[in-house]
Image (spheres, rainbow, N blue to C red):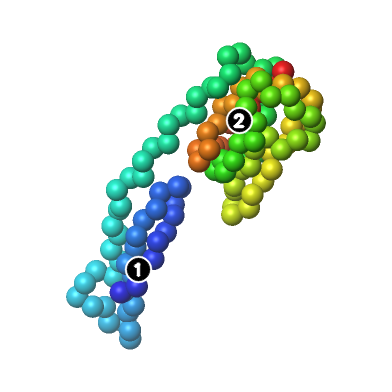
Amino acid sequence: MKKFLIKVNGNQYEVEVEEVKDGVAASEPAVSISTPAPAPKVEAPKKSGGAQGSVTVKAPMPGTILNINVNPGDAIKKGQVLLVLEAMKMENEIQSPQDGTVASVNATKGASVNAGDVLITLN
């Protein structure tokens, strides 16, 4: 038996696969799947700022928030790195589309986000 970890739709499964030689299967089942206990849920992101900003910065792709570089009330410049999003084993810097002030941070470090989720709002 060989063990493999397989990830499907964000859920990780441990799978054991038995090799069949000369078309003869062993008495055990060829494939058995054990489902691990579900991972703890990450709390929904809470807004840090009071008011919603007029400009939204959205996640361009699904991924995990690795780092948040700004806080509500911070003055920012166009092109400044607001946060780092890991997607497909790559770190993607999410930059400010304009000068302004951070109105709210709608993501938390370690949270999983989907494409189109609002991460930060700006005024």
Residue at 59% over, 52% down: 88
Q: Quadrant of residue 81?
A: top right
Q: SS for tag 2?
A: strand
The x and y percentages for residue 33 are: 30, 59
Q: Are marks 2 and 1 in contact (CB under 8 Å)?
A: no
Farthest bottom residue in view: 22
Q: Is residue 64 left or right of residue 56?
A: left
- Label 2 – label 1 distance at C-alpha: 38 Å
Farthest left residue in view: 27
The x and y percentages for residue 5 are: 40, 61
User: What's the amino acid at mark 2?
Assistant: Leu
The x and y percentages for residue 46 are: 50, 24
The residue that label 2 is drawn on is 119
Q: Is residue 55 visible?
A: no
Where's the C terminus, which quadrant?
top right
Q: Quadrant of residue 59?
A: top right
Q: SS for tag 1?
A: strand
Looking at the image, is mark 2 or mark 1 earlier in the sequence? 1
Of residues 72 and 92, the one drawn nearer to the viewer in this rendering: 72
Disc 2 packing (10 Å; few <14; some 14–19; many ≥20): many
Of residues 51 and 6, the one drawn nearer to the viewer in this rendering: 51
User: What's the amino acid at mark 1?
Assistant: Lys
Residue at 64% over, 49% down: 91
Q: Is residue 13 above or below residue 119?
A: below
Residue at 19% over, 75% down: 27
The x and y percentages for residue 104 are: 61, 22
Q: Is residue 83 above or below residue 25?
A: above
Q: Is residue 37 left or right of residue 59?
A: left
The residue that label 1 is drawn on is 3
